[in-house]
Image: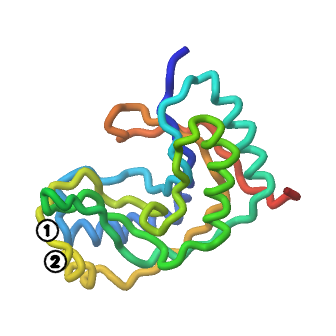
Amino acid sequence: MSKVNIFIAYMLSERESRQFGQMANSVREVFRPEGKDEKFFHTTLLFIGWVDESLLPFIQKHLARIAASQKPISLDINRLGYFYNEKKHCLKVIYAVPENIPEELRSLCMRLYEVIGKPLSGKTIPAISPSTIHFTISKRLKNRMSKEDFRTLISQVQPFSIPVDINAIGLYYCKDPDHRYYREICRYPFQDGER
């Protein structure tokens, strides 16, 4: 049986992607990132990794059940963040995040972990902290820049505010080793039913 590299995520809607794309372009004009620009704006809710394709029906069944009992979650994407390579003194990733992570989103991530991630591996970590719930703008960067310089440049882009409604969850797999292309396996809108 072949294996697939999969993750559960919310992909921005067309309207949200247009707004986010405008902000991302402003960020790139300021930072001139030397790396890969993200094309598919999303936030990963649970990274699963490599699994046998035979496990996809199990994942899809539970994903559908979770979506059926989930209310939409509203976010305000309004600040920039980064992952930093301390050894090379350079940026690794530039991303945008909400100032506050709603408790409903933390609960959703934990539920995905308990119902899907934990039975599959027992090692999958739910993305529930402000440093991991994020929307990547540019990645695999080589820009040598101090954290202080980054914070100074942020002021040239902020303030901004992009309303996002997480109203569906999807299962995706990476089509190439560099994670440049994603393919949707399934997507379930939130139904707000009884748990």
Amino acid tagged 2:
Asp
Amino acid tagged 1:
Met
Cα distance between the residues tagged 1 and 2: 6 Å
**Helix, strand, or loop for circle 2?**
helix
Q: Which residue is mark 1?
A: 145
Give 187 or 117, whichever is nearer the viewer.
117
Within-10-Å neighbours for mark 2: few <14, some 14–19, many 20+: few
Give 128 or 175, whichever is nearer the viewer.
128
Q: Quadrant of the N terminus?
A: top right
Residues under numbered marks 1 and 2 in contact, where contact means CB atoms less than 8 Å apart: yes
Horizontal side, residue 45 vs residue 158: left or right: right
**Helix, strand, or loop for circle 1?**
loop
Q: Residue at x 46, y 80 (%)?
A: 161
**Residue 149 got which mark?**
2
Give 75 or 45, whichever is nearer the viewer.
45
Q: Quadrant of the C terminus?
A: bottom right
Give 184 or 70, whichever is nearer the viewer.
70
Q: Quadrant of residue 109?
A: bottom right
